[in-house]
């Protein structure tokens, strides 16, 4: 029985981190870049170097030196994700898993952002409220992968305070302090019929006594940014930004729904596992380094590019500890790799008040086939974007954008903590719709 208990704890432990990597995350892993509609229209090319985009508060505080007026910007992006599983599996006895394909695991979720910049001489000060990491997915109850994942709801919200200094027309430097809140709620089914093995309990078979497990927790922590802006000419911006890793020690609770007949067996045998208990774990949002270029070729045409390295290799393993001594600590391996994304985009002012934007981006996944599970249907992504900007006067700008994200088909061949194996692939894509308003004073 101790072995089965340990396996179940393992499934709860893995849920905390693996759930972070799918759903509304529109970059590889569980990263969300949708803090600027203007940048989204170029597939985020020029995110750390663009003129007039107040989201540089979060993406490169040094670029705040490009602003000569107090600027307030608000962005809203609707992420419409679709994901379907195709496949099946077998339980611990080799019998086919019951249940459907889980339905559409995606959801439509709004992602807001707010930025403000105040220039004061050679200094500039800024603040932003963004959601850089997160997801929400939910499979149908009773689907074939229920023992790995049901619901995943994770949010990371950043409150950023930034400052920059312009040394001269060619060089600026900036830094910021990030206060991040992290919330997670995750559920999955528990195959108590497999835990109470038929050899020891002949009345039980795998898939005959399903319960559920839910884990919920949160934490707040601090991080930082440092950025640089180099302008060899007045028409060329080169931005470099480093965002720190942010470590979280999550305090939460684990909740179990155990079938009545299983509760009776546990009471008879004196088994005290699978009781509601406190849960403690740690997780880190990764460090990110971004290099951006924005080049004006004329008063009407600008070309931008981005290359970004996300240091996912910090997510090698994960350990969960539970207050209930009957549930021992558990460690799971992930072995994520650092990933690189790149994007290229353009701005074309085809009329005095109107700007057309477009871009293409490619994003590598940090996951490996050997460690992928249905909470983590992540793979390489291609972004195709277009947007339109309207400047009715010099103090007001409106932007709309659309992005389509195609996700290369991820496969899973995953052994659950209770001995079932899920085999198949996911078809997934996302459509993003954004609108923003910028006001200058």
Image (cartoon, rainbow, N blue to C red):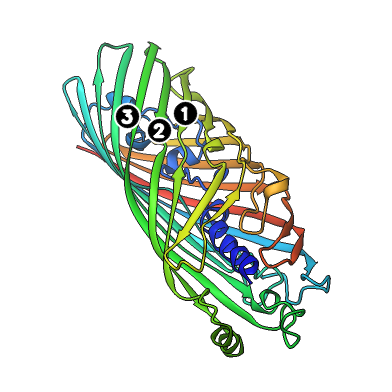
Q: Nearer the viewer, mark 2 or mark 3?
A: 2
| Circle 3 or circle 1, nearest the eye | 1
Question: Residue beneath label 1, please?
Answer: 289
Q: Residues within 10 Å of mark 3 (few under 14, many from 20)?
A: many
- Please provide percent x and percent y for residue 188: 58, 69
Q: Do the numbered discs 1 and 2 sit on residues whose CB atoms are within 8 Å? A: yes
Q: Position of residue 10 (x, y in %)?
A: 59, 60
Above or below, 315 against 64 in this view is below
Residue corresponding to mark 3: 61
Answer with mark 3 or mark 1, whichever residue precedes in sequence: 3
Rendered location of residue 161, percent (x, y): 25, 38
Q: Is residue 275 left or right of residue 367?
A: left
2 or 3: tag closer to the N-terminus = 3
- Residue for badge 2: 243
Question: Which residue sits at x=36%, y=19%?
Answer: 229
Image quarter (top left, top right, bottom left or bottom right) of the C terminus:
top left
């Amino acid at each position: 029985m101790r072995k089965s208990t340990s396996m179940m704890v393992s499934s709860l432990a893995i849920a905390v981190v693996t759930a972070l990597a799918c759903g509304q995350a529109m970059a590889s892993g569980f990263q969300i870049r949708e803090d600027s509609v203007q940048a989204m229209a170029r597939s985020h090319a020029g995110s750390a170097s663009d003129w007039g985009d107040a989201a540089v508060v979060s993406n490169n505080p040094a670029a705040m030196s490009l602003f000569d007026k107090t600027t307030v910007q608000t962005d809203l992006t609707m992420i419409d994700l679709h994901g379907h599983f195709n496949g099946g599996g077998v339980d611990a006895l080799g019998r086919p898993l019951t249940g459907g394909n889980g339905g559409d695991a995606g959801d439509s979720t709004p992602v807001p952002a707010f930025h403000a910049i105040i220039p004061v001489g050679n200094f500039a000060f800024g603040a932003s409220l963004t959601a850089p990491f997160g997801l929400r997915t939910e499979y149908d109850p009773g689907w074939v992968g229920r023992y790995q994942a049901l619901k995943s709801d994770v949010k990371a919200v950043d409150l950023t305070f930034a400052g920059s200094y312009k040394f001269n027309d060619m060089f600026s430097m900036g830094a910021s302090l990030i206060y991040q809140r992290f919330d997670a709620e995750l559920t999955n089914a528990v195959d108590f019929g497999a835990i109470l093995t038929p050899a020891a309990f002949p009345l039980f078979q795998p898939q005959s006594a399903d319960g559920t497990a839910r884990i919920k927790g949160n934490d707040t922590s601090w991080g930082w940014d440092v950025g640089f802006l180099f302008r060899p000419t007045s028409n060329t911006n080169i931005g470099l930004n480093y965002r720190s890793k942010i470590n979280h020690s999550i305090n939460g609770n684990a909740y179990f729904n155990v079938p009545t007949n299983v509760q009776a067996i546990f009471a008879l045998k004196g088994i005290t596992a699978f009781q509601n208990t406190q849960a403690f774990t740690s997780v880190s949002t990764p460090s990110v380094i971004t290099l951006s270029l924005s080049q004006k070729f004329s008063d009407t045409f600008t070309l931008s590019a981005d290359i970004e390295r996300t240091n996912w290799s910090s997510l090698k393993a994960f350990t969960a500890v539970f207050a209930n001594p009957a549930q021992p600590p558990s460690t799971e391996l992930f072995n994520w790799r650092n990933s690189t994304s790149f994007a290229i985009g353009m701005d074309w002012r085809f009329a005095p008040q109107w700007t057309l934007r477009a871009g293409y981006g490619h994003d590598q996944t940090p996951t490996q086939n050997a460690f992928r599970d249905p909470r983590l249907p992540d793979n390489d992504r291609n972004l195709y974007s277009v947007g339109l900007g309207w400047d009715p006067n010099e103090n007001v700008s409106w932007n709309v954008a659309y992005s389509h994200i195609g996700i290369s088909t991820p496969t899973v061949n995953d052994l659950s903590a209770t001995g079932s194996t899920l085999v198949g692939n996911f078809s997934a894509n996302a459509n993003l719709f954004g609108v923003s308003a910028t006001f200058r004073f």
